[in-house]
Image (tube, rainbow, N blue to C red):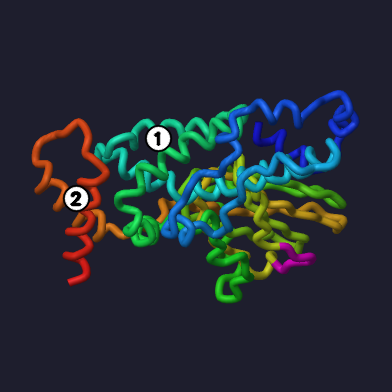
Amino acid sequence: MRPIYYDLLDRSIVRYFLRFTDFLETSTFSNPQQYKFPVTNENIDSIMPISKPHNLDITGFVSKEQYYDNFIQQINEWLKWFDRFIDIFQPIVEWLKNYKVDEAAQSFTELHAIRNESTITIIQMKTPIEKILKLFKPFSNYLPRICYLCNCLSPFHAVDEGHLDDGYNSTNNIRELSRSHPNNKFQVDSKSQFEKSFFINNRQTTQWSIASEKFPCQVELTYRTIGSYDNDKKLFTKNNAAINKYILRGEFEAQRDGLLTIVIGNQGLSSRTIWFQIRSSRLSICHLFYGIFHIFYQQDYPQLVDTINPNALNQLLKRVFSFIDR
């Protein structure tokens, strides 16, 4: 349903059929609780990079068109917030699942379904998020620090959007690539444009570089997050970039799966041979925190346990951070 809600932000033929519907009558008999946004606390609000949306306003509209436009706009605001929430907190839920915290395993499964099933409705998204907010409540005071240590606060971060490295000429780079990765190249015909995309797994730091054998080119690089509300990130664009002289390189961090796309424009009469290198590694995290937490966890639970209560986790985190801060 998410792609449909996004598309409905633009005026569409749907508006023509509004005269044949009765949204207001339908809303009157619907469960009013489903129009209320999940309750959050100040710790969650401080972590989220966007403001919490209001409850869905389904009354006081003078026309069906006004009701429809407002409703679709509000739904998309909810979706944007839900997407950001999952970007940030899915790694935390996975961590809790690994340590057998109550409800964490089920919540992680539900988040995975939201990520991968485009037919899930807004209410089906809301329910597991409310469950996670309830799960977080006993230890929410520690969430800002945990998110920072887990390196999940930013859905996307361009460490280096792209620059010509004048300390590393293209000829040397191409010579090395031709020996180590001879297939890392593609050709762009004269008076044409060529596009090549690379799949990037979630929670990766990605370093990229490109070079041209003989001539400068028009270059554009973007990262498109799969299934995200705000999914296009333009990294670099330049006409007549001198990638035949110096290697063009950049780096970014992304929480979600996506496509890194290189677009090369060739306005010349000769073809261009482009060499590239894409290297990805897991996002850095604070291994010291995780190590200390694991030691304290093993002290409290030396034997395998089925689950631990979120309140017990809160006490465990209290001791862990007291040890770290002393």
* Chief SS of the magenta region: strand
- Seen at 65% across and 35% down, the residue is 2
Task: Answer left or right for 93 relative to 296.
Answer: right
For residue 83, which numbered disc appears in the image?
none
**How many residues crowd mark 2 within 10 Å: few (<14), some (14–19), many (20+)?**
some
- Seen at 76% across and 30% down, the residue is 23
Q: Visible in this render: residue 97?
A: yes
User: Which quadrant of the rendered structure holds the C terminus?
Assistant: bottom left
Is the Cβ of the residue at disc 1 closer than 8 Å to that at disc 2? no
For residue 107, which numbered disc appears in the image?
1
- Seen at 27% across and 57% down, the residue is 287
Query: Looking at this view, is 260 or 242 the one in front?
Result: 260
Q: Amino acid at mark 1?
A: Ser
155 relative to 72, above or below: below
Q: What span is in magenta? A: 237-242
Query: Looking at this view, is 166 or 253 the one in front?
Result: 253
Whichever of callouts 1 and 2 sits on the residue coming sooner in the sequence is 1
Place of residue 142 in the rendered image (x, y in percent of width and height, measured from the top left): 32, 58
233 relative to 62, above or below: below
Q: Secondary structure at mark 2?
A: helix
Does the magenta segment cover residue 58? no
Query: Looking at this view, is 256 or 221 the one in front?
Result: 256
Q: Amino acid at mark 2?
A: His
